[in-house]
Amino acid sequence: MGKLRTGRSTMVRIWRIYNLIKYSNYPDVRQLADQLEVSLRTIERDIEQLRDQMQAPIVYDRMHRGYYFSEEYILPPIRFTEGEIVSIIIGQKLLLQMEGLLAGQVFRNLRDKLECLLGEESLCSNKDLEEAVSFGIAPIRGEDWRVAKNLAKLREAVFQRQQVEIIYNSISAGEKRKRQVHPYHLRFYDGAWYLIGYCLIHHEVRIFAVDRIETLRITGAIFEYPVDFKIDEYLNGVWGIMRGRYYHVKISFDNHQARWIRERPLRNGERLEESADGAVILETAVSGLMEIKRWIMGFGSHAKVLEPAELREEIREELIKMGKIYGVEK
């Protein structure tokens, strides 16, 4: 039995079947099933729905052994459910906060088009809906106009596989440098956008903060996306956005904090171990220690690093420095 794709909605399948019958050369059930990666019975039910509920003049031609429309037919426009409209508006609001203020015009245009499509009395015009949901997302890091401008160009470059040239304000190097980059992926994390791509200067995949890109130019040069690059594999073990050496980390959380740690969704490969005193021990593999160190220190005295010794020492040194700042004696 072939691999079936079950996530595609009925309306999407029907839309594709409509186009395949209209523009293909007499497709049969098996050809349609192969194209949509579903079972033969699913295609048969979809064709029945097209014919019986949507009055599509579908005819099976025995000579050509496939389906066609016996007369001109246009599929009725797709109607959004109330829940789908709510999801669009909420998603629009979330994206607006993640994109920055200059993206507002894009989403206002989207709202206008939805109102034209759905009517002025639709939920799109319901101001109460916008007041009902909010997102606690920090303001976008960097100058709003520059981030929005760079994001627009980077999206184009990522989707069209075009090389970019950037002037990058490198914090580690303490200077601005020109880079030629093959853009692979855009990632939003903790109030900032990041570009993940292959740097032609360093000959490796690197992460660039979009807000630290001073200027950006799409060169027009096309690159081939490497078949062996997988974004999930590249970010495997990354606690936030920074990569580094891999470490096995064990953290003990006391019984006061344990209840919240138990409710925290486990990341890939993480494990929780219960202690007799009500504490829990979290085991995880991380790429780099800086970000998980900050996370652990956020729990104060309720968290204790068991492994690795390097992380324990980093936190100990940080606490000594803090003690000096706040006048705490050893």
Image (cartoon, helix red, strand yellow):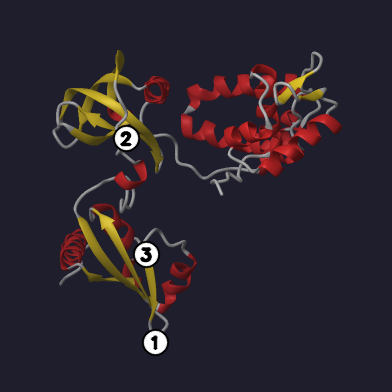
> Which residue carries the number 2 mark?
227
Q: Is residue 53 visible?
A: no
Element under disc 2? loop
Helix or strand or loop: what does disc 1 sit on?
Answer: loop
Does 137 sit left or right of 35 as displayed? left
Amino acid tagged 1:
Ala
Q: Tell me which amino acid carries mark 3.
A: Glu
Q: Residues within 10 Å of mark 3 (few under 14, many from 20)?
A: few
Q: From the viewer's perspective, is the residue at label 3 or at label 1 nearer?
A: 3
Identify which residue is drawn at 37% across, 64% down.
270
In the image, 299 versus 236, the foreground residue is 236
Where's residue 275, x and y in %? 38, 82
Give percent across and percent down for residue 134.
59, 42
Give the residue at mark 3.
270
Local crowd size for mark 1, using a 10 Å CA cut-off: few (<14), some (14–19), many (≥20): few
Residue at 60 percent across and 35 percent down: it is: 36
